Image (cartoon, helix red, strand yellow):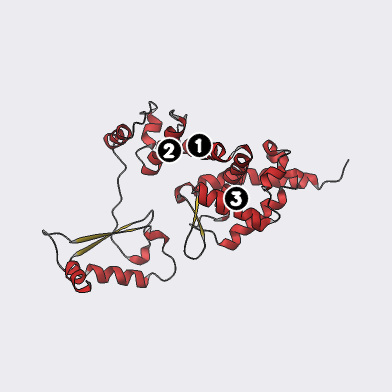
């Protein structure tokens, strides 16, 4: 079997490679990249292998030639919509967004769940509609109380975790736990409910029976954000990544607004009575 594989890798087929390997997420490789580059070069030298690497931003250390992938054409978008029975948006701004595959996939999920075209004219509106769809679906599946937990996970914890990434593609498990632990302690503070009045009187529901921050981390991050909603994922080292790095800056900006209000509310709560 090994001999047959070696022969296959060394034998071009019809003037082209016998095997094409796709290495997706090359920008997520960390540490010393020399072993990866050595393996890529070794396979390329066999003569029968072509390696295609895909990344949002190619690591310069790999020294590989780059070719940007153009957006989808309107015809390709139309074909996809027709194939999946999805309505074609009338707003040109939304139709333009769908030429980016991640937005097209989000549009698909939104329309499948709601049966309507989202009222979105930019990427922020489409992201909000997508997150709202996830929360609504979770609430329908697990009930009203679980829906409030999903809301908090998506609209408070996810932006906080994104902001703590500080522009990097990942967040260490220790840093992620500190974020959640800080938030868990805030559920007993009045300043939190001043900033997020929707959750007033629902502290017990939001805690979901968790006795401490570790148990709450298991519920909010591992169960809701990671397992059920797939908005976070962990790599082999346990670091947390967003479902798509493209949205990190948008989510972080949401937290910066909320964070400023929280800081102001906490400061006011410490002022002496007049």
Dot 2 and dot 1 residues touching (CB under 8 Å): yes
Dot 3 and dot 1 residues touching (CB under 8 Å): no
Q: Which residue is mark 3?
A: 220
Q: Which residue is mark 2?
A: 109
Query: Counting residues from the N terminus, which is met first, the one under dot 3 or under dot 1?
Result: 1
Point out the image quarter for the N terminus: bottom left
Q: Quadrant of residue 172?
A: bottom right
The answer to which of 124 and 244 lies nearer the viewer is: 244
The residue carrying pointer 3 sits among few (fewer than 14), some (14 to 19) or many (20 or more) residues within 10 Å by Cα, namely many
> Residue at 15% of width from left, 59% of height from top?
16
Query: Rounded to the nearest whole Å, what is the CA distance between mark 3 and mark 1?
Result: 18 Å
> Residue at 57% of width from left, 38% of height from top?
139
Q: Is residue 68 left or right of residue 106?
A: left
The residue carrying pointer 1 sits among few (fewer than 14), some (14 to 19) or many (20 or more) residues within 10 Å by Cα, namely some
- Is residue 18 at all visible to an observer of this figure? yes
Query: Counting residues from the N terminus, which is met first, the one under dot 2 or under dot 1?
Result: 2
Q: Quadrant of residue 151?
A: top right
Outermost top residue? 90
Query: Rounded to the nearest whole Å, what is the CA distance between mark 3 and mark 2?
Result: 22 Å
Query: Rounded to the nearest whole Å, what is the CA distance between mark 2 and mark 1?
Result: 8 Å
Q: Is residue 15 above or below residue 93?
A: below
Q: Is residue 158 left or right of residue 204?
A: left
Query: Counting residues from the N terminus, which is met first, the one under dot 3 or under dot 2?
Result: 2
The answer to which of 50 and 87 lies nearer the viewer is: 87
Give the secondary structure at mark 3.
Answer: helix
Outermost left residue? 14
> Residue at 42% of width from left, 34% of height from top?
112
Please give the label number shown on residue 133: 1
| Spot occupied by residue 70 in the image (x, y as percentages of width and height) | 30, 45
Q: Is residue 174 above or below residue 109?
A: below
Q: Is residue 181 above or below residue 134?
A: below
């Amino acid at each position: 079997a090994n001999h047959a594989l070696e022969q296959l890798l060394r034998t071009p087929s019809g003037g082209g490679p016998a095997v094409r390997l796709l290495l997706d997420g090359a920008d997520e490789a960390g540490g010393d990249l020399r072993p990866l580059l050595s393996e890529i070069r070794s396979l390329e030298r066999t003569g029968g292998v072509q390696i295609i690497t895909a990344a949002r931003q190619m690591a310069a250390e790999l020294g590989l030639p780059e070719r940007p992938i153009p957006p989808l054409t309107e015809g390709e978008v139309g074909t996809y919509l027709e194939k999946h029975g999805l309505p074609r948006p009338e707003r040109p701004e939304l139709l333009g967004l769908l030429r980016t595959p991640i937005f097209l996939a989000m549009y698909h999920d939104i329309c499948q769940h709601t049966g309507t075209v989202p009222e979105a004219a930019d990427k922020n509106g489409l992201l909000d509609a997508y997150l709202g769809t996830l929360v609504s679906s979770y609430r329908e599946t697990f009930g009203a109380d679980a829906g409030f937990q999903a809301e908090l996970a998506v609209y408070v914890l996810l932006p906080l975790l994104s902001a703590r990434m500080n522009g990097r593609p990942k967040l260490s498990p220790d840093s992620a736990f500190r974020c959640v632990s800080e938030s868990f302690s805030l559920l007993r503070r009045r300043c939190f409910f001043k900033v997020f009045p929707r959750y007033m009187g629902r502290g017990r529901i939001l805690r979901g029976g968790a006795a401490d921050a570790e148990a709450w981390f298991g519920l909010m991050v591992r169960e809701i954000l990671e397992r059920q909603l797939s908005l976070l994922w962990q790599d082999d080292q346990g670091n947390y990544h967003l479902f798509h790095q493209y949205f990190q800056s948008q989510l972080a900006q949401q937290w910066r607004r909320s964070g400023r209000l929280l800081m102001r509310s906490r400061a006011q709560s410490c002022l002496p009575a007049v």
